[in-house]
Image: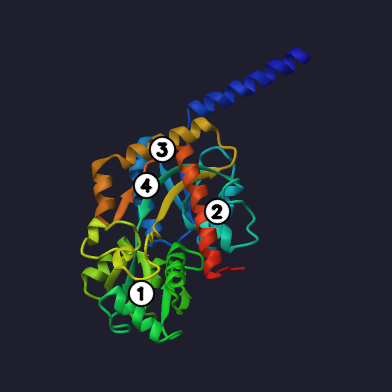
Amino acid sequence: MRRALTLAAASLVASAAFAQQDWPQQPVTLIMGFPAGSGVDVVARAIQEPLARQLGRPVIIDYKSGAAGNIASDYVAHAKPDGYTLAFGTAATHGSNAALYKKLPFDVEADFVAVAPVLDVSNVLTVNPDVINVKTLKEFVELVKANPGKYNYASTGNGAGTHMAFAEFNSRLGLNMVHVPYKGGPEAITSVVRGETCCIMNQVQTVLPQYKAGKVRLLGVTTATAVPAVKEVPTIASSGLPGTKGFDSSIWFGIFAPKGTDAQVVDKLNAAVKAVLEQPEVRERFESQGNTVRIETPAQFKKTVHENRLKWAEVAKAANISVD
């Protein structure tokens, strides 16, 4: 009897090992915590088909938007760890949200396996000149300081990267502005174009169409270095204004699996994402939109996530921000 049980257990282990080696055997689903058409969604859509070709199976994007991505994260945190249900996360969902939401039903690090980053994304201070008629970052700061509490800035949601970037900026420069959160990127940038809000720190890729159409002005990118897609726009860090030295509020997008996902599956996913990002047409497409491809091993990405979580915790504390 004991020998039979031992043989059965060995058979199960062998079957599991074979399944891991033969993964994937079915479609892979990316759970998206933000609306269709948002900057995060645009990036996920861009890698969807190339990733499917690498894996040899369809890649499906399933939208579970809301609560700054927490609904999607919660779903994946409690999903079966077989590599078929993944989170398309951000520096907000797996970083700043941990500092802003005190009662999350999951841990942004412990309940996930960091699989692979995809991009570093630059935000850019974007203004509607009909609402706040300034042409430089210096003029913007002077006008806002002279009118505390007058100007409303938009974000793509409480705790989103667009919110945290502006919160860090305001905290560093001592600005008093009113935060108006929206449900996603399309609604937020529309509010600026319509003049419902004066400005937003949104992703370069999201504001480019409005910028090229002459509907908004770009005053400064949040990355430490200039963004080739809008090379004429200076960095906030280079402005020389007090509080802006070393300013770098870029964010990343990446893929996460539930805790317990087999390392072989994680490595296969990481290799597939790396192969996609190394394709010249994919890289060029992202760079033309103001993004920078980011390639890391699972261990390197895990470190990135941890360091990012610590950074945003400091920003949230300095700016006295919380959501609940």
Report the disc number at residue 57.
3
Q: Between 308 and 33, which is closer to the camera in this rendering? A: 308
The correct choice, above or below, for 81 with respect to 316 in the image is above
Residue identified by numbered label 4: 48
In this rendering, the label closer to the viewer, 3 or 2: 2
Is disc 2 placed on a helix, strand or loop? helix
- Mark 4–mark 3 contact, CB under 8 Å? no
Query: On the rendered structure, is 254 left or right of 218?
Result: right
Q: How many marks?
A: 4
Residue identified by numbered label 2: 73
Q: Position of residue 186 (x, y in %)?
A: 38, 68
- Mark 3–mark 1 contact, CB under 8 Å? no
Of callouts 4 and 1, the N-terminal one: 4
Q: Would you say residue 207 is visible in this rendering?
A: no
Of callouts 3 and 2, the N-terminal one: 3
Q: CA distance from mark 3 to mark 1?
A: 36 Å
